[in-house]
Amino acid sequence: MKVVLLAAGRSKRMQPIPDKNFLIFNGIKLIVHQLMQLKHAGFDDILIMGGEHNLDKLNELKNCEELKGMKIQVLEQKNLEEGMAGAIMDASEVIGNNPICIVSSNDIVNVMAYELILKAAQNDDFESYIVGKKVNQYFPGGYLEVEENGTIKSIIEKPGEGNEPSDLVNIVIHYHKNTAKLIEALRNVKTENDDKYEVALNNLIKSGSKMQAVSFEGNWQPIKFPWHIFKVMKLQFEQIEGRISTEAQIANSAIINNKDKVIIESGAKIFDNAVINGPCYIGKNVIVANNALVRDSIVNDGCVIGYATEIARSYLGENVWTHTNYIGDSIIAGNCSFGSGTVTGNLRLDEQDIKININGKSVSSGANKFGLITGENIRCGINTSFMPGIKIGSNSLIGAGLVIPQDIPENSFVKGKIELDIRENKTDLDPNAREEMMKKLK
């Protein structure tokens, strides 16, 4: 059976974070993690559907050591606006009429979900099997309307809280035995919305195709919005097995708490009096300088955590440099640098949930602590403050001594006016005053 792995999305809701397929969690790229899970479940024939923007990176996966033994093919999805339907139709010549399992590269699931669909595919009673995740609260996605025996009656997109047809959310792990029939249905759908694939499945059900829900109760976390990165971090930290490379240099006075949940890779240097509170991932050649504190965070390869800097509950991409900063509850993409004294605000004065601008709409993150979100290649001057939930686009320079209360587009140079009021000093400074003060203190 061939797996069609959908990886062509442009991550519009994640902006300014780069392609989420290549976010790194505990030293492993997200899409590699997905492929490793598929391999563990027993899938080894993979067709990755990418876009023009990420084909080169996807092709590099063929040489990934962790994926040895897997047959990996990469194909471009031409029309990204057609979503899943466009991917399947563009793959039609490669997959022919062979059975396929469609998987999203951005839905993080326990390997059990893949094992369940593989087992279900061995049963010929149904033409298609769809994994449904049991939920106990509303999720703004598609739901499976099912009969008592699990037969799917329809897929209902975003029914609204209180109108759910069942407790099964439609997870993009779909097995189709009759691929030619599916592709024909996709070609016959006429809709201006991005739900062409779901409409095609509903049309197939109406015409007599039998589909069954495969109920899944394990871990599942989609990555649709920036704050989902923190949820994936939490899932990954739950599974982390601590290890410290023998090629890392740890000062005698450095403190590492909760060691069984801390990974420190080769080449890392942890200086005197630095503190690392697990769970944490410290990548290759990372420097954690004197008196720095890193807690509940991912710090990827090549980062420098400068003197007296605190990194709390944050994700740092590769080659991020800090200098006496506070980075809290933030997502910082690669090749960013923060001047000394620059800080990220992460809590509103009223302590309400932080809202973030997503494609022009203010969307609640569901958390009352959320700091900064950046793209790649950012430089920030000294003593700049970022308000909670602010986004900085890639390739931007932020001047010194500023308070940034709004999103900054990519390719921006930001400076502000700092007006000095300089007057004559009419206060005499007694050179003996400090000596007298010290005598009183004694």
Image (cartoon, helix red, strand yellow):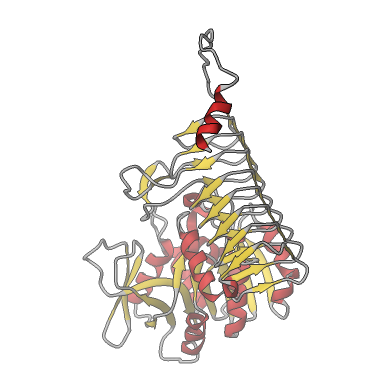
The image quarter containing residue 169 is bottom left
Is 15 above or below relative to 21? above
Q: Can residue 392 be spotted in the picture? A: no
Residue pictured at 60% horizontal, 72% vertical: 259
Residue pictured at 50% horizontal, 91% vertical: 122
Residue pictured at 43% horizontal, 81% vertical: 129
Residue pictured at 65% horizontal, 47% vertical: 307
Q: Position of residue 127 (x, y in %)?
A: 43, 83
Specify the farthest residue to the left. Answer: 162
Quadrant (top left, top right, bottom left, bottom right) of the N terminus: bottom right
Q: Nearer the viewer, residue 269 or 368?
A: 269
The image quarter containing residue 241 is bottom right
Q: Nearer the viewer, residue 104 or 257?
A: 257
Is 43 above or below relative to 440? below
Is 125 above or below relative to 33? below
Q: Position of residue 276 (x, y in %)?
A: 59, 62
Q: Position of residue 223 (x, y in %)?
A: 48, 61
Left or right: 14 as drawn, with respect to 145: right
Left or right: 384 as drawn, with respect to 46: left
Q: Nearer the viewer, residue 232 or 78?
A: 232
